[in-house]
Each structure stands twice: as structure tokens, then as C-alpha cells.
Amino acid sequence: MAQFYSAKRRVTTRQIITVEATDLDPFGQGVARHNGKALFITGLLPDERAEITLTEDKRQYARGQVKRRLSESPERVAPRCPHYGVCGGCQQQHASVALQQKSKSHALARLIRHEVNDIIAGMPWGYRRRARLSLSYQPKTERLEMGFRKAGSSDIVNIRQCPILVPQLEALLPEVRSCLSELDGIRHLGHVELVLANNGPLMVLRHTAPLSKKDREKLERFSHSHELALFLAPQSEILEQVTGEAPWYASNGLRLTFSPRDFIQVNDGVNQQMIEKALAWLDVQPTDRVLDLFCGMGNFTLPLAQKALNVVGVEGVDALVAKGQENAQLNGLQNVTFFHQNLEEDVTRQPWAKQGFDKILLDPARAGAPGVMQHIIKLAPKRVVYVSCNPATLARDSETLTQAGYQIQRLAMLDMFPHTGHLESMVLFEHIDTLNNSSCRKAARE
């Protein structure tokens, strides 16, 4: 019988091999070499040797499972979370924070081909001010499941602790579960979101059928007794505020109001440092015009307006533009304007771009900003700060700027999500003409 090669061939033998990991990937897997290709082993740390069996063997890479660890890295730590290894939220709790930051920095430096100059980090535990927990009533056990998804599965892990949540939200977990478990409409609950604003916590409950008067009263009593704002979401596009005040958070001395559904950075400590660093890198002067692309509701735009002559924020989501304008008014900032714009179109043709910009900041989504880079080049700013949540698209977009005469001056790894595989970063680009002019002025002074 003829046999044909398949790239998805399964491992049919359970031969035990000994390997030593040399690196840590974003998913907490040790990386070794075997038969000339990368071998990924769950739970193994760099410098650890282990006897493993192959679980998958493909043309470009292989995966293995530890049978017996032969040595232990000094960077190995005991995970704090009892759900670690089952819950899909964290991948690196078995590695020290120092190793996590080192591995992420090395990965970033390889992709961007520039050394990491700064690591911006905050508290490694209790940092998350937002969580969305799935809800599912199980008729067989007559119990409500509340938690995050299992790794590689749609099943729910019943969460009772989560040490990466801010303590105020973690303490609410058993209370929220108890309250929701007593509702008559328990079979029609979709998910619950918990957010910690500066003026207190809030809860958003998604329900797929109308709540009874009795259930609404239970939820209102719960919100009052725990001093949290209550929002109900009978449909994905509807949000009803039942109790409490509109949430807000402080940033750079400013007060920013937001809707529970608006995007805000979940790590407040790193967010504050990131804003401060971005403003320092841009070296914003009182005479500068600054453009903030993908500005959201003004996380960078409003702090920039405190330093610059004029700031323009551009965003593709109309509701966030309205929120940015509202926050500018609330904070008495008259030198900032927000525009709703499709950023794939040529923004340089817009009336607000005619005077040009001295500095540009952009903070795109994971897809990056391939359609925007040529527009930035046309505007010819002296400096560009690019904030990224995906190093692969950052590397691609960086090539466009470097080919147009910009050079990377600083690269920072943002440890926005400790213990997870998320790798965020920030880059400062400066045009070579600006650098040459600065060098000439310095030489003339000397």
C-alpha cells in the first residue's frame, strides 16, 4: 500500500528524549532544539533539562510533554492562582516576573531589531481593573458556573480567586456569584463584567431574557449594599444604568469619564507610566501641533493638550470621539479637537491637517496601521511615537518609517499584562534630518 506524507502527521511512538530549554515563548512554553527544529515544551523553563515525549511532530516544529524534570531553574516559582494551568487567562505564573520581562524583551528586540531601552512595569499582582466572566447555569448540578474559559476550550473554569485582579474586584467574586445564583432568571444570564473606576466599582450584567421585578430589586439591593454601580445589558447594543454614578478615572491630573463598554487600559499603573514616557519621548513644546491617531476617548490626547499649542485626536469609533470631546470640555481644554475619521483614507487631505504637525502619536489595534503609515510620512513630523499591542504588526509598520528616513531612537517593553503572553511596546522614531540638524546645532555650540 502506498503511503503519503502528511504535514499533520501524528506521533505514533512515545520515545523519551532528553532536552534542555534555552528560551521561554509568550505562552509559557520552554523552547528547545531537536532534529534541527524548534521544540516547544509546556511548563519547561530556560536552562531546565527534562525527559519528554513528543506529542506533535511537524515539518517546521514539534511539541513535547514533560515526563520527568531533571533540573530546576532558580527562576521557577509557585503559581499564586489555584486555577493556574486550567484557566486560559495566564500562561507564565510558573516563571519569575524577572524572567517573564527578560523573555518578552528579548522577543521584542529580535522582532524590531533594536535593543530594548526601557521596561515599563507596575505591580505584577492585583493590577487588572476590568474582568469579564462568563456565566452558565448547569441544570444537572443546579449550579451557576462563573469564570473564565479553559485553555483551548469553551468550557468555563469556576473562578473563586484571581490574584491578577485588583483586590477590590477579587473580593467581589464570591459575592457576585452568590447574588446571581439566587436570581429566578439564572438560566438567562450571559456574562458579568466588573470594572474598578476611581469613583468605585461597577457591574454590568448581560441577560438574554427580561428580568423579573423581583430579580431587579435583588440586584439593586446588592449594588447598594456593596456600593457598586449597576448596569444591565438586555441586548449587546443596549446598556441601562440602574444605580450609581457615571464611572471615571484619573490620568495625568485629568478626570476622564467613560462608559463601561468603552476601551480603557486595564493596567492603570502601567498606563500612567506609558503616558508620561510618551510625552517625554515626543518632547512636546508649547509651540507644537500634535496629532494623535487611533486616539480613543483621549487617553493620550488630553495629556498632550496640557503641553502642546494644539492637539488633534482622530478616531474611527464615533462614540469615542464624542466621549473625547466631552472630556476635553470637562477638563477645560480648549486647544484640542477630536474628529471621527476612517483612518484608511488619506487624512492629509482633511482641513485640520493642512497646517501640518510637529509630532505624531499613534496607538492602533492589533492589526497595526499599514494604511496610515504613508499618511504619516506625507505629514513629515519630526518625531513619531508608536504604541503597539502586537509586535509583529509593529515590526511591519516600522519598516515603512525607516525606509522613509526615520530611525528608532528608543524602544520600550510595556509589561501591561504580567503572567500572560501579551507583549505590548512603544517606539520613538525620529527623522534623520531632525537628528542631523540637532547634531549640527550641538557642534556649533561646542
Image (cartoon, rainbow, N blue to C red):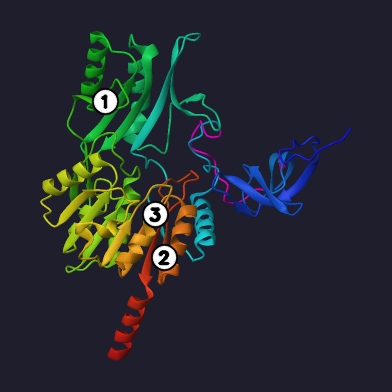
Q: Depth check: 170 or 207 in front? A: 207
**Apparent side of residue 396 relative to residue 360 in the rendered image (left or right):** right
The 10 Å Cα crowd at callout 1, few under 14, some 14 to 19, many 20 or more, is few
- Say what amino acid the circle numbered 2 marks: Leu
Is the C terminus in the top left, top right, bottom left or bottom right quadrant?
bottom left
Q: Which residue is mark 2?
A: 401
Span highlighted in magenta in the image: 67-85
Q: Do the numbered discs 3 and 1 sit on residues whose CB atoms are within 8 Å?
A: no
Is-magenta flag for residue 210?
no
Between marks 1 and 2 in the image, the one whose residue lies nearer the viewer? 2
Q: Residue furthest right?
A: 1
| Separation (CA) of disc 3 from disc 1 | 32 Å
The residue depicted at 32 percent of the width and 49 percent of the height is: 269
> N-terminal of the two: label 2 or label 3?
3
Contact between labelled residues 2 and 1, with CB atoms less than 8 Å apart: no
The kind of residue on which mark 3 rests is Gly
Q: Dot 2 surroundings within 10 Å: few (below 14), some, or many (20 or more)?
A: many
Residue placed most toward the observer, 414 or 374 = 374
Specify the label residue 370 is tagged with.
none
Q: Nearer the viewer, mark 3 or mark 1?
A: 3
Report whether residue 281 is seen. no
Magenta-drawn stretch, dominant element (helix, strand or loop): loop
Q: Which residue is mark 1?
A: 238
How far is the residue under mark 1 from the one under mark 2?
Answer: 41 Å
Question: Magenta includes 69?
Answer: yes
Residue that label 3 marks? 371
